[in-house]
Image (cartoon, rainbow, N blue to C red):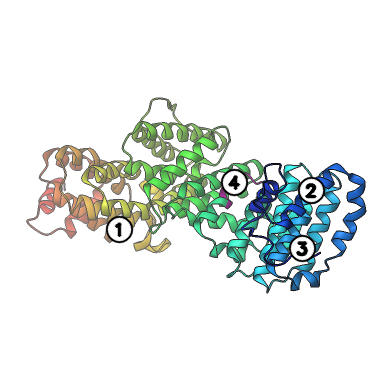
Amino acid sequence: MEPSDRELDFYPTNGKVWKDFLFSCCSDNMGDQYSDWMLFIRLMSMLIKKSDSVWRAIKSRIFSKFPAKRFREMPIHSLICIFSLFIASLHDTDMEDTSNKVISLATAAFDPFDKERHDILIRAIQCTKYILDENRYDSSQAVATLMTLMGKLDDKKDVLLYAECCMCIGEKVSEIGSLVRFLPSMNDMDLEKLFVMTAHCRIENNVLWNAAIRHLKSPNFDVAINYIVEQLAIKFERSQSALQNIRQVVQNLLAEKSYKLEVCLSFLREFLRKTNDIIYPVELIVPLWLVVSFEKPNTDELNDISGSICKNLQISFRKNGLYFAAFSTDSSSAILSICWLFETISKNARNSKKWVHENIMNWSELLASPLHCILMNAEDTTVMHCCRIMSYLYLYVAQQIYKPPSECNFNRSPFVRFCKLILQNVLLEREFPAVFIREVLPNYMAGMLSLPVHSAPYLLRVVSDILEKHLDDDVLKEIFTNMLKQKPQLTTALYASSKVGTNLFNFVSQIK
């Protein structure tokens, strides 16, 4: 009872293809196109359906004819024929017992070093699993066996077969320990299928999670975003473990080598949609919102996003005991929302020092890299928009961001990086309309002058350069005069450091 190797003109490229082929063979529409062996399989299938007693009598004899050694020695096409017969015998009559026999035979014959043969045996188990599922039988034994055999595959030669098995077992992929070996070698298409398949899985899998984070850099980043957002929503239901996960996502999106507006906006859009009815730590995504705001001046979508974030910020402020002024989240623009946020932070800097310090420093550290990327490549309108937003950060929270040289790596600190990016590289180097400069520069100067400029040489130099460049503007000159009258120590320091005959020297001489 062993077919010749010429008996079957079919090769199962996966378990589902095998199942469909056998269904076609055993249907009434088969016709004459198949071999004698396929006709025999069809007759067996009909016999099993018609006569339960006859099937029970011959079942044990059929399965006992083929020990593992025989499977390892017979030609590949003979192996396909025999397992096609076994699988075709899976009908309602004793389906569970018969499927266990098929799985046991395939497992016993499995040899990880015989690739061509183990491809067939694994696909026989896949096929069995699909048939059990279609008939609403328990397929857990087939899944468990596949998971075990998958761990024995070669992570270089068997990557496609491994991915095929992942598609077969579904969400159980999240429980496979061997995934860490195979994932780096999977192609993007198979990886994206895994993300779609496991997005709603409630079993955490760090291997898949980290792969999704890396996949944010790929062209088809939306698939990874959907997986990440769905997993975050599940994590928020459980515990604070989601805090670290969302930090990881935001840090990755805003990293200098990773930053792309369309990816950040897509994530923000999907995240807010999914978490609409969930309480989450909104302060963790504030940097993402701010960066998107740099490049998306007051669009309707950004205003909607800003409204949603401010609504959740109010919940967070209330929870953490922060005072905040009433603010309508329905009609306000993104720029007004950002002003409200920074002003609220400023008003709570003393009473909620720990919360303010932790969050403002986290935001600042994450903003510097994407801001640099944007300013390097943006058109003037976008640059001006960035400068406008950052002016409110200086105006309200400069004191919270600034750290003296004794407390940090000064040149790499967020505040100094902002000064270099905005004040020195943009406002001092480039020319902008006077109306724009009059709008933003006083905010920057107010923030700078709230710091100990007179005792910090770098800050003193930046302030001196700003004054020297813009003192020809009478409107700004009057504003600066009023500011410096309140800062006698700074005025003295500016006088001492300025050169005779310069605009700055003449200006501070009059104030003194």
Q: Which quarter shows the N terminus?
A: bottom right
Sequence-first disc among 2 and 3:
2
Identified by mark 2, the residue type is Ser
Sequence-first disc among 1 and 2:
2
Distance between the Cα atoms at labels 2 and 4? Answer: 39 Å
Residue 417 versus residue 288 in the image, above or below: below
Residue identifier under label 2: 45
Sequence-first disc among 2 and 4:
2
- Secondary structure under badge 1? helix
- Secondary structure under badge 3? helix
Tell me, for residue 199, which label it has, or none.
Answer: 4
Sequence-first disc among 1 and 3:
3
Distance between the Cα atoms at labels 4 and 3? Answer: 31 Å
Circle 3 crowding by C-alpha within 10 Å: few under 14, some 14–19, many from 20: many
Which of label 1 and label 2 is nearer to you? Answer: 2
The percent coordinates of residue 152 (x first, y second) are 69, 68
Sequence-first disc among 1 and 4:
4
Circle 4 crowding by C-alpha within 10 Å: few under 14, some 14–19, many from 20: many
Say whether residue 349 is visible.
no
Tell me, for residue 455, which label it has, or none.
Answer: 1
Identify which residue is drawn at 60% across, 69% down: 155
Distance between the Cα atoms at labels 1 and 2? Answer: 92 Å
Residue identifier under label 3: 106
Identify which residue is drawn at 63% across, 70% down: 154
State which region is magenta. Answer: 194-202
